[in-house]
Every structure is written in C-alpha cells, then in structure tokens.
Image (cartoon, grey):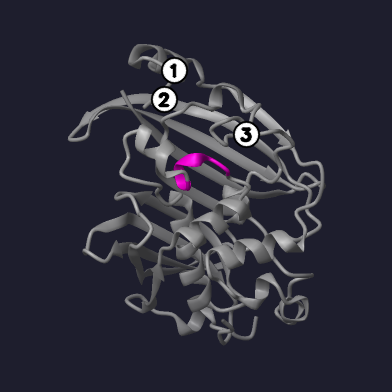
Amino acid sequence: METPIRYFEDVKVGDELPALRKEISMARMMAYGASTWDFIRIHYDADFVREKGFKGPFLDGQMLGGFLAQQVQDWAGPRAFLRKLGFQNRVMVFPGDTVTGHGVVTATRIDGKEALVECDLWMENQDGDKVVQPASAAVRFPRRGG
Amino acid sequence: MAEYSGSELLAKLKNSVGQEIVHRAPDALGRPSFRMYALSIEDFNPLYTDGEFAKSHGLKDVMAPPTLICDTWQYLDSDIDERGDFIGRGELDFAGRLRGGNDYEFFQPIHPDDIITAHWKVKDVFEKTGRSGHMVFQIIEASFYNQRDELLARNLETLFYRL
C-alpha cells in the first residue's frame, strides 16, 4: 500500500498508528515458512506438533515482527527507515486467530544525524489477549528541507 | 518435548554459551525472495517489489521487507533433517525451543544483490522459575553482513526451553 511521505516535523508524541489487523490462516503460515526457508514441522504438521504436546501447528513468532514492521512502515511512509524493532511473544497464535497491532508515538528526538521517532507497540488476539507485549520501534524520518 | 532429559538439555545449553557459527550464503538474496516474503505477510508495499518506486524514494533498487533478513534461513547452504530443521547448526540447534522475543536493529536497506554472511553467537543461558514452571533461556545474537562486509542488521533472539 502506497502511503504519502511523512516528515519528522509532522510527528508528535501521542500520535497513534493506524491499527493493523491480520487473519491468520494455515495457508499464510505455510507461505511464511516457505518465504523464510523455515521447514520446521511444528508450524504445519498437526500430528507431529501434537506429539510434542501442543494443540496444533502454531504461528512462527517472528511473523508477528513482520506484521509490526509493516504497520510501522505503512504509517511512516516510503522515506522512513525502520532502525529498531523489539517485541516479546506472550501468547501462541494459531490458524483461525485474528491479531490486531496497535501503536503510539512515545518520543521524537535528534540523535546525531538521525531524526528518530520512537513508538510503543502491542498486538492483541480476538479474545483481547496480548500476544505481543511489550514491543517498540525506532524509526528514522526524513526532515523537511533536508 | 525435548530430545534430552532436563539435566542433559541444561548442560548442553550452558555449554553453548560463546559458541559462534558463521554461515556464508552461496548466492545473492534476489528479488523473488522479497516478493515471496511480502506475500507471506500480506504486505504489498511497493518499496519491496517496484524498482522505479523505490528509486523515486532514494533507494538504489527495491529493498527487502525489514524483518526478512532476521528470520530467513536462505543463507544456509545445507540440507534439512526429519524435523524440517537445517542440518549443520551445531549445538545452537535443540528440539523443544520456543520464542520469547526478538530485538532487531537495522543499519541500512538490504537489496537483491546482497550476499549474506550471518554470524550466530550464543550470548547467554540462564534459568528462571515462574508461573510456567522451570525454564531455561538462551540469548542468541545474529549479525548480518553483505559481500562488502557492511553490517546490515542484528537480531538479538530470546529462546526458551521448558525443563
């Protein structure tokens, strides 16, 4: 999705990032495994994963990091560069779940040559459980006139 | 869940601290990898697939979706075992691991012609007992360089194992 250029001067503490909602399907999980060359059976082989004591194949936790990066990049625009992204996985995610990412700007600062914006992020499932928390991002923004 | 007894697993994990493995990719990442990853997370940002769009925003070509480099195994030139896991990851590889979280740091855009060298190092292993029982945490740092030895990204990964 193409988004307009957003400049450092346009961002202020308290700004909310648009929510990003994802419906989790086995097909998308399979695609993620293929795209990351990750063929570990716990993410697609129901018999194998139940033998290991889980209720069924579950989502690779780093896929949620991909969603968070998308959420931040979509909001920040095509000239912004994601510098840092951190997240802790709290609740396992299974096919059929829906997860929604949220975010808010917590700081804006100049660090050397970088104009940085920091955000708190979190992600909930359809039951309101925090599947990712805490999470945060730091993004380098272009400057007006720069 | 694990292949080892609790004490064996703990000993092996503790023994892994300081272990470092370097993987050199046999070839460049390539544009299809970016398109495939973007498809898999349903992220159709043209920065990842449209070279002209990327150039219009100051990039030399399409860039990788930011988190791709931290999760792909594309740079491993190896076979997989019966669990679907890559062979040759040494003592970094144990059954039964779960993800606690990740801290990514990105230093520059990654492009299709980048040939990746990944440095994996076990930074720490520690035990913790909480509501979920007795667990062991393993902290792994992965640093990713291109063919010009430019640092592209770093991933501090927290994995845990139930004993």
Is residue B155 found left or right of B50 in the rendered image? left
Is tag 1's residue or tag 3's residue first in the polypeptide sequence? Answer: 1
* Residue located 68% across and 63% down the image: B34
Disc 2 target residue: B125
Chain for disc number 2:
B
Q: Quadrant of residue B163?
A: top left
Q: CA distance from mark 3 to mark 2?
A: 22 Å
Q: Where residue A89 sits in the image (x, y, percent)?
A: 35, 49
Q: Which residues are magenta?
A: A39-44
Asked if disc 2 and disc 1 are in contact, CB closer than 8 Å, the reply is yes
Q: Is residue A113 visible?
A: no
Q: Considering depth in this image, is A44 or A139 the residue closer to the camera?
A: A44
Q: Where residue B114 sits in the image (x, y, percent)?
A: 78, 53
Disc 1 target residue: B14
Disc 3 target residue: B86
Q: Where residue A26 sits in the image (x, y, percent)?
A: 46, 58
Q: Quadrant of residue B35?
A: bottom right
* Residue type of the residue flagged with mark 2: Val
Asked if disc 3 and disc 2 are in contact, CB closer than 8 Å, the reply is no
What SS does tag 3 mark? loop
* Residue type of the residue flagged with mark 3: Phe
